[in-house]
Amino acid sequence: MHEVPLDSSRGADGTGAHAVTVPRALATEAVHAGRDDLAGLGLHAPPIDLSTTYPSHDSRAEAARIDAFAADGTLDDGPPVYARLGNPTVARFETALARLEGTESAVAFASGMAALTAVLLVRGAAGLRHVVAVRPLYGCSDHLLHAGLLGTEVTWADPAGIAAAIRPDTGLVMVESPANPTLAELDLAAVAHACGEVPLLADNTFATPVLQRPAASGARLVLHSATKYLGGHGDVLGGVVACDEEFARQLRQVRFATGGVLHPLAGYLLLRGLATLPVRVRAASANAAELARRLADDPRVARVHYPRIGGAMVAFEVRGDPHEVIAGVRLITPAVSLGSVDSLIQHPASISHRVVDAADRHSSGVSDRLLRMSCGLEDVEDLWRDLDCALGPVSGPPAGAAPHGRPAHCLPAYERPAHGRTAMAK
């Protein structure tokens, strides 16, 4: 059981000069973080503030606050000014996520890629444009670094080569563990040690703070695509960086200047998603572990990837055509993304990692036969029945099979409609 220090002096805006720490279990913190002031406001559910601007009759004081923000990213506890500077509903989500990750602060963005972009811009503004990264990463993160769209230069290294790859202009070391899509794991404490004074950015999207907290292992920055498990229902787009307050101030300046703000409704949905995060992750992880066990024993599957720390993701390499498996699922949704209450499956080489050069994909373990499945909250027997049908016959039509060789239990419920979609969702 994780225990999270409760900062009883900290409000929904995440500020507070003094903290009184009381150990509180992660499941409890997930429900109450970002909501501790509600009773004093006479509320039970968090409010949604959709305002874009706020009245101020003291323009001199407002000018002083804007000057302070422009100087070092500091924004005091006074009334809100403008939605691009900050929003009370979004601040509740930021406070809650920081508490779950065990960091001083968190800064939310319109998407995970907007969050990563802001981190790179902060380091680039300091003249530190070089990044050391370990593959595999999420395909779009890989592309952003490799293409140099923000003026960055990347050196790809294995974990043992991180220290040797660091240069005087290195601004960041980036890793993802478990990695997308192979679920490869890293010793984050060892990686943080190899970074020395260079900030380590750990993408914790797959694990979530339920399974690991990278800041406790030495990561200065913890990245999430909040679209995934933090939201948890496939209906909100967002990103967030959990970090120390010094770095958070710089991120807020970049967010204000570039406009990658999280919508208040998204902030509300993400805060609500955090309340059930531990329950969802643990239940989906139980499904994933059982499916990984069955897939490992299945002769139609060549290899199964499942993390030692657990989790709700399973990756597996099939002996047959992976595109046929994608086309064959009926209960599981063939779609990109992950972390929703319903199960999703996709072919990384065709979609999520298509932007990564084929040779680079292969060298980092992303084979052309690899499938990535995000396990949801359905009954595991229903999920396995769908996978079993999609994987097809073991070898030739077995006894009791339907005429086309699929197991008999796959018909008629899994017969493809004549008008049905056969292409992969993107």
Image (cartoon, helix red, strand yellow):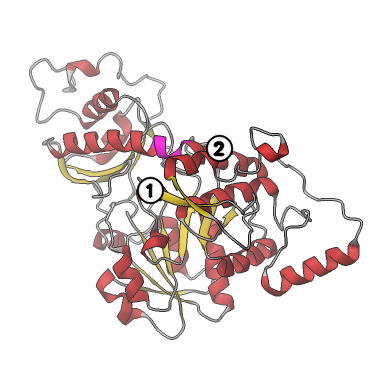
| Vertical side of 316 occupied by 147: above or below | below
Q: Is residue 321 left or right of residue 126?
A: left
| Vertical side of 340 occupied by 127: above or below | below
At label 1, the amino acid type is His
Which SS type dominates the magenta stretch? helix
The residue pinned by badge 2 equals 272
Question: Which of the 4 image quadrants contains residue 35?
Answer: top right
Question: Which of the 4 image quadrants contains residue 66?
Answer: bottom right
Nearer to the camera, 379 or 388: 379
The residue pinned by badge 1 equals 2
Q: How many marks?
A: 2
Res. 158 visible in picture: no
Structural distance between the alpha carbons of marks 2 and 1:
20 Å
Q: Which residues are magenta?
A: 276-280
Q: Position of residue 123 (x, y in %)?
A: 53, 74
Q: Position of residue 322 (x, y in %)?
A: 26, 40
Numbered disc 1: secondary structure:
loop
Q: Is residue 36 left or right of residue 305?
A: right
Between marks 2 and 1 in the image, the one whose residue lies nearer the viewer: 1
Residue at point 41% right, 49% down?
A: 3
Residue at point 58% right, 70% down?
A: 246
